[in-house]
Amino acid sequence: MKAWDFKTNSFYERKPSFGSKLHGDEDAVFDVNEGRYRKAWSYNKRQGRAFHRCISGLLRAKGRLERIRFMTLTSSPSSDRSKLNYHFNLLVKKAEYTFGFSIAYWKAETEEGYGVLHVLFRVDERKKPLRVKKNCPLPKHMRGFIPHKWLSGTWNEIHGAKVVEIHELKGMKSERDIAYYVVGNYVSKQPIKRISYSRNWVCKGFSKKWKDFLEIYGKRAVELWGKWVINTDFCSYRESNLTDWVDK
């Protein structure tokens, strides 16, 4: 199987270091608590926003004990780079239809090669796809798992590139370490073209809500934001006075 070499920014062949007991498959798991990923990078404003949007979704996943996976999608000389994000949306719809679960994602498009997407995603249990394939190729206990072979073949069919990588991120003990791993090793080191995320990565308008936290709570905003994202039930969430929330 392929793994990412951070020094050369390319894939190399290696044997899987971890076999997922749940999936019973060569579902590689990267332990982001390894020392080399724990460096606190210094960010400019754009990279800082990317880090905040990334970690907010990770904290939401923590509050619901959801598993996070990381995916890299490449382009080839024959790929239409202008349609990279459009093709990604098609891939998400195909995955949701085939495997029967909705995907919440955060992604960064970089200028590597012919265009690369680095994607964090999880299963959104509260939302179901509009259309689902009758015979899902995977059992229920493998919910959220996307086979590498299927991903490579489907991405090649859609975008004309078959080099992809997907693995689960171990190390849910620290969402900050995961964010450092993704943003520090990809976003801060590569020319960024675009950062985007699905509406259900956290909730609708959460970036505006973050500005409200900064204005009201100042230095306490980071601490209180994490608690708010982890503990808020967004299924029944309604706009309320933030001071009322923190008093509770």
Image: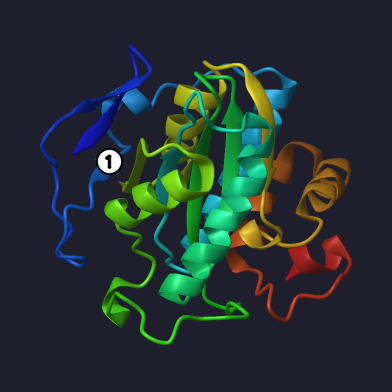
Disc 1 element:
strand
Foreground residue, 90 or 167?
A: 90
Name the residue beneath numbered marker 1.
30
Measuring from the top left, give residue 187's x and y in whole percent.
Answer: 56, 25
Measuring from the top left, give residue 41's x and y in whole percent.
Answer: 52, 19
Q: Residue at x 52, y 76 (%)?
A: 125
> Is 187 placed above or below 134 here?
above
Measuring from the top left, give residue 9's x and y in whole percent.
Answer: 38, 17
Left or right: 188 with respect to 25?
Answer: right
Q: Is residue 243 visible?
A: yes
Q: Residue at x 27, y 80 (%)?
A: 139
* Quadrant of the rendering where the C terminus is positioned: bottom right
Left or right: 4 with respect to 211?
Answer: left
Foreground residue, 53 or 28?
A: 28
Foreground residue, 93 or 218?
A: 93
> Is 101 placed above or below 78 here?
below
Colour scheme shown: rainbow
